[in-house]
Amino acid sequence: MDRLEYLRPSDDRQAERNLSSDLSIYINKQASQDVKKKAAAVYVATTDGKTILGYYTLSQYSVQLDQISIEISRKFPKYPVVPATLLGRVARTISAKGPGVGELMLLDALYRAVKMSDQIASAAIVTDAKDQKAREFYKNYGFIELPKVERRLFLPMESISKVFPRTR
């Protein structure tokens, strides 16, 4: 993988066919529409600028404060809902499996989310783990499970800022 870049609606790119079917359908048929309609920002991993090895999406989101454990919610403003960034779909091709691509895409997403939070407030990044393996992957990077929402995890921007210090 040479780069991670924003998918523009006009891009003529195709994901390798060895993504799982629902993830391949999304990037090949729906992603450009989501970008065009401002439903999601789609970032793609590519080696040649055309073939997609993996992708992730970022969107605005919010979290109800009562979904977060009390010890962590004390660090957030006392509003019923706090702004967040949703790390939506995350996928990589089978040929990109192994160490590196998934981690690089996650780190890139965290970096972009913390940088954007300086411009548009976001207290945390939220994601839904599709299965146990994904849940463990996110937990290895410090994500915390929301006790009231199954498979939902979050990571406070404060934690991300320790890895990627803000430069205002």
Image (cartoon, rainbow, N blue to C red):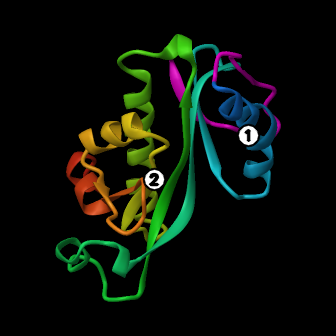
Q: Which residue is mark 2?
A: 127
Please, what is the three-letter code of the amino acid marked with disc 2? Thr
Mark carried by residue 8: 1
SS at badge 2: strand
SS at badge 1: loop
Q: In the figure, is residue 76 to the left or right of 150? A: left
The quarter in which the C terminus is drawn is bottom left
Q: Residue 95, percent across and down? A: 54, 11
Q: Quadrant of residue 108?
A: top left
In the rendered view, would you say 38 is above or below 35?
below
Question: Is 98 or 44 nearer to us in this picture?
Answer: 98
Question: Is 22 or 50 nearer to us in this picture?
Answer: 22
Q: Residue furthest left?
A: 71
Q: Residue furthest top?
A: 95
Badge 1 density bin: few <14, some 14–19, many ≥20, Cα 10 Å: some
The residue at 25%/62% (across/down) is: 158
Point out the frontmost of discs 2 and 1: 2
Please, what is the three-letter code of the amino acid marked with disc 1? Arg
The residue at 36%/43% (across/down) is: 135
Q: Residue 36, percent across and down? A: 79, 51
Q: Quadrant of residue 42?
A: top right
Which residue range is magenta in the image? 1-19
Q: Residue 102, percent across and down? A: 43, 28
